[in-house]
Amino acid sequence: MKKDSLEHVTIRINGLVQGVGFRPFVYRAAQKNNISGWVKNRSEGIFIEASGEMMNIDNFISDLKSKAPVAAQIENVLILPSIQAHKNGFQIILSDEYSGEKEITQIGPDIAVCANCLEDIRKQPHRLNYPFTNCTNCGPRFSIIRDLPYDRNKTTMDVFEMCPTCASEYENPTNRRFHAQPVACLNCGPNYMFISENVKTENFEEVLELTARYLTEGKIVAIKGIGGFFIACDALQEYSVQHLRKIKIREGKPFAIMFRDVETVTQYCAANQKEIDTLDSWRRPIVILRSKNLLPEGVSNGINTIGALLPYMPFHYLLFEKLKTAAIVFTSGNLKDEPIIIENNDAKEKLGLICDALVIYNRIIYNRSDDSVLQVVNNKPRIMRRSRGWAPNPVNLKFNSDGILATGAELKNTFCLGKGNQGILSQHIGDLKDFETFSFYEKSIVQFQKMFRVKPEIIVHDLHPDYLSTKYALSSGLSTFSVQHHHAHIASCMAEFGIDEQVIGVSFDGAGLGDDGNIWGSEFMVCDLDRYQLVTHFEYIPMPGGDLAAKEPWRMAVSWLYKVFGRDFLHFDLPFLEKIQDEKMEWLLNAINGNINCPLTSSCGRLFDAVSALLNLCTHSTFEAEAPMRLENIAAKNENRKYTYKQAGVIVFSEMFTEIVRDLQQKTGPETISAKFHNTISSIITEGVKKISKNTGLNKVVLSGGTFQNRYLLERTENNLLESGFNVFSNCSVPCNDGGISLGQLAIAAKRRNLNKISIN
Ligand code: ZN
Ligand code: ZN
Ligand code: FE
């Protein structure tokens, strides 16, 4: 071989390439293509030095790009000529410590146990039934990482010293556990413990037997998962399910169900291929499926969908082997609105009191993450809660967003940290009004800054001065500015799809403070990432009791009836009215008349509340968005009629309410009324968009806001708009609910800074 026939290159790969088995993959590709040189992890990405024949180098690079491990996401491959010549084979070089350079690669999300590892726990003597088995293609990542670069000593596995067998696997480039940071076995890794009033054992066989026995006996067991604790009971035992509702003080909200396998899922739920693929993907989220109504009533509580998920830890698989039941309730281990519990002692203190037993293990969860939730609408997975399996995957932005922190909304909070051209979206945080959740928020912001090495210079917050996220921003002492809530919703979707131009935005949700001080939630706007112009919205209506109206939908029903019929409605034959005491009713009407704690709202969520209460489906909510969910739940499928509305500057609903009341009096079924109402909202959107398009020539339509979690509405509206020739975008990989607000805020801030519209203090 002539010396100069060899080529030398430096390759730098960015993206999600750490903690997903990338270096072993590079090593194997190098072996295959006869490449000499090395690969190493640096905080800025994967670095490769490669020497080889030109054709081999080409094949090597092509393998790197096309055959990467399942959870890897390559964003950028930079190839430069190198003067460094390598011979004598290929090596993996240990990570450099943080070099002080600004750019950084990503932290991998947690990955469900892979099929090979499940096989290993059947046959590898040192891993027989070992529940912490993992490899470079699977296992915990985000939940155990303290810092970058991703190496064992930067994770909560640092306290477990590898045994010689694990060490030899870890060091062997041909082994699947080569540089698998959380590698462990029976001899050296973490272990489970079962604790109940009378029993305490660390013998894993007993832990499994006892857990299975307790569940079979109808008892309730708290089990430590990947990103936090979960509470489980047999989903087929009505008594257990009801009992769990009682102890969790969670009267209404449907429980998530873990099914034994895909086959069992399809026994209990209707699922199409896309839904099954999503359910069974390495991220293993909760997928909202249509129920076949074979589970006890208490599981979904009258809602005809099931939040289904499949086992994702070895423990889950091993447990199902011992269980007769094919379905267990799998709900987050927390109290009320508090964040999901991650610490063993916390679990003992809080869950120990309400559960019959605890199953814990001795590895620390560093980054909390709930199960992610999504649903498939129009054949696209739409994330509703973005946490395990996604966090902390960033979203690529069109602009540099470095040093910007977006603090998000208040309910379903996430925050978003700008790093280079990426928005690093936090895991689902929750309702900041809860004290524990707020500390989780503060702590996570600090953790993210440290992990991703960003020092914020600008903080973006919601317009609402009372949001705790706003207060957090304002108390930072940094440059801050506010973004209107509904503009942020639209921007979240624009950022997700890389849109940077003027669009028609339709932002429908429960509540967000508007520029005029009223509570918005049905905004039609023409906007780009910098500015927005409001075109129209629903007519304003008093929201008696302010925030309380969201918890008591009957208030909105009365507010509308009073507006449309005056006091006459008190004599209507409407069953929901019987639930309201006369005094309460008078008090409410007085409040409206006297404008006492009656902010004006155009919220679409509150309109759904009103109709839901009017149909007597939900007058008092037991969980967030219950009223709209119950309304959607019953909507007739083949109904195409709609109600009358007027577009008179704003969208006026008096005729619609007159017609709904008439339908009720004529004993029209609530299924029909619900469908007609949904069709009305869908028609308002389509017609509104057409009108704006006619005036502006715009063709791109962005739908966002929590209302679009409504499957019926999104399906219809999207299809109608597509049929009318529009280019329609709605959130998929980022929640359309307030979980997406922080990304929208960040995108707007980055754009404005790019236009030199904001400066640093
Ligand atoms: Zn594996
Ligand atoms: Zn070991
Ligand atoms: Fe919102």
Image (tube, helix red, strand yellow):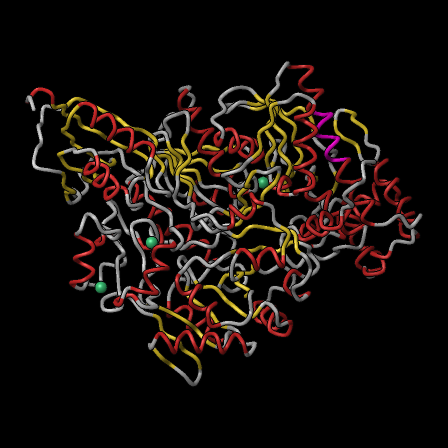
Which residue lies at the image location 62% right of the left edge and 72% below the top edge?
237
Residue 390 appears left or right of 68: right
Q: Work out which quarter of the rendered image holds the N terminus and state it.
A: top left
Residue 684 shown in magenta = yes
Residue 204 appears left or right of 159: right
In front here: 349 or 129?
129
Whether residue 450 is visible to the viewer of this picture, yes or no, is: no
Q: Name the spot of residue 268 as percent of width and height, x first.
A: 63, 59
Whether residue 658 is visible to the viewer of this picture, yes or no, is: yes
Q: Name the spot of residue 750 as percent of width and height, x first.
A: 41, 27
Q: Work out which quarter of the rendered image holds the C terminus and state it.
A: top left
Q: Which residues are magenta?
A: 680-688
Which residue lies at the image location 51% right of the left edge and 28% below the top edge?
494
- Determine the quadrant in which ligand 1 lies: bottom left
Residue 364 appears left or right of 498: left
Q: Is residue 253 above or below residue 34?
A: below
Residue 253 appears left or right of 451: right
Q: Name the spot of residue 667 as percent of width and height, x first.
A: 91, 50
In front here: 504 or 648?
504
Q: Name the spot of residue 283 as percent of width and height, x first.
A: 44, 48
Residue 95 shown in magenta = no
Q: Is residue 684 above or below residue 472?
A: above
The mark total stands at 0
Q: Main secondary structure of the magenta part?
A: helix
Toward the bottom, the furthest residue is 198
In front here: 456 or 137?
137
Which residue lies at the image location 72% right of the left edge and 47% below the top edge?
632
